[in-house]
Image: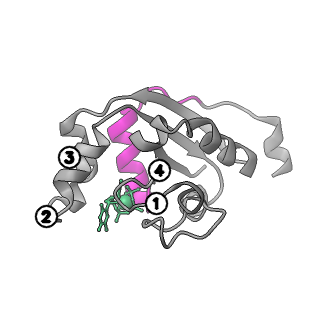
Amino acid sequence: MEKTFLMVKPDGVQRNLIGEIVSRFEKKGFQLVGAKLMQIPTELAEEHYGEHKERPFFGELVEFITSGPVFAMVWQGENVIATARHMMGATNPKDAAPGTIRGEYGVIVGKNIIHGSDSSESAEREIGLFFNGEGLVEYKRDVNNWI
Ligand code: ABT
Ligand code: MG
């Protein structure tokens, strides 16, 4: 079953949005298979955002993502990678459609509430980085028969 890595960023945690965000993915029908509240070490942040190393905002991005606890999660379900990105909305909250997470709660691109893997390669890489094969739980859920 397809898996993705989602993370409530420090701004989302400080604004008490963990429950709201978890609730949206639960109600959609996806299955939570791993979660932890953690403070990201600088080295992990730099590796996670490695693709942006040469961008002018890289320093600020690493500083922001390590500035407070994040809620890291792995979610499972059919097409969960693309669907979660739709549910999150555009990267810049000013362009994110109403009804999406960033469209409802975000204001600026540098504090856009949530991260989600953008491809199956990223999902595999990010789940490996943050969970390292540990802490994931596979369990049967009766509701799966109805989705
Ligand atoms: P992430 O889920 O954080 O990876 O965001 P997303 O994949 O939607 O967008 P990308 B392009 O990966 O942005 C990564 C983070 O960089 C911030 N950013 C991006 C800026 O601050 N300025 C910019 O001009 C751009 C393009 C937004 C993302 N994170 N935060 N917070
Ligand atoms: Mg990204």
Q: Residues within 10 Å of mark 1 (few under 14, many from 20)?
A: some
- Disc 4 is placed on an element classified as strand
Q: Residue at x 21, y 54 (%)?
A: 50
**What residue does disc 2 label?**
54
Query: Any magenta on residue 136?
Result: yes
Residue 47's x, y, as percent? 22, 47
Q: Whole-Å distance between the Cαs marked 1 and 3?
A: 24 Å
Residue placed farthest to the bottom in the image?
95
Cβ of mark 4 under 8 A from ligand 1: yes
- Mark 4 and mark 1 in contact? Answer it, CB < 8 Å: no
Precedes in sequence: disc 1 or disc 3: 3
N-terminal label among 4 and 2: 2
Numbered circle sitting on residue 114? 4
Q: Is residue 121 above or below residue 135?
A: below
Badge 1 marks a residue whose secondary structure is loop
Q: Which mark is residue 59?
A: none
Residue 103 visible (yes or no): yes
Query: How many residues crowd around disc 4 within 10 Å: few (fewer than 14), some, or many (20 or more)?
Result: many
Nearer to us in this view, 140 or 55: 55
Q: Which sits earlier in the primary sequence, circle 4 or circle 3? A: 3
Identified by mark 1, the residue type is: Val
Rounded to the nearest angstrom, the CA distance separating label 4 from label 2 is: 22 Å
Task: Tell me if residue 72 can be seen.
Answer: no
